[in-house]
Amino acid sequence: MASEPCDACGEDVPIGGGISGMWSSDPQGTGGMTLEFPDGSEFFLCFDCIDDLPEEPTAADVADAVEE
């Protein structure tokens, strides 16, 4: 299974899908998502870090979480 580090906490986040998950009897889902903002910035965050953001986060909110 592929993984990618969370931009905020640095933990490896599993990325679901792909051929490896197709044959597994215990498939694992994706543990995060990429947030894209109108200014063109993108951040890949785990669901725990996303939960720590405000209800309608801005790029500045995410950038602050990444810097912490």
Image (tube, rainbow, N blue to C red):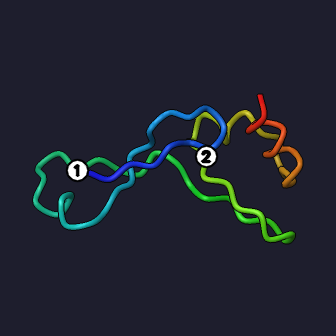
Q: Mark 2 — residue?
A: 45
The residue at which mark 1 appears reads as 27
Instruction: Give the residue displayed 81% in from the left and 45% down from the top.
Output: 63
At x 72%, y 65%, the residue is 36
Residue 50 point in image, percent of width and height: 67, 42
Residue 53, quarter of the rendered image: top right
Query: Which element carries disc 2, helix, strand or loop?
Result: strand
Estimate the spatial distance between the alpha carbons at disc 2 and disc 1, rounded to whole Å.
21 Å
Q: Position of residue 24 (x, y in %)?
A: 13, 53
Residue at 70%, 61% in the rendered image: 42
Q: What element does badge 1 sit on?
A: loop
Q: Is residue 3 shown left or right of residue 35? A: left
In the rendered structure, which amino acid carries the disc numbered 1?
Pro
The label number, if any, that marks residue 56 in the structure image: none
**x, y percent for residue 54:** 83, 41
**Crowd band around label 2 with a 10 angstrom C-alpha radius: few (<14), some (14–19), many (20+):** many
Q: With 36 as the anchor, is 12 left or right in this view?
A: left
Discs 2, 1 touching: Cβ within 8 Å: no
Mark 2: amino acid: Leu
Q: Earlier in the sequence, mark 2 or mark 1?
A: 1
Residue 55's place in the image compared with 35, above or below, is above
Rendered view: 51 above or below 57: above
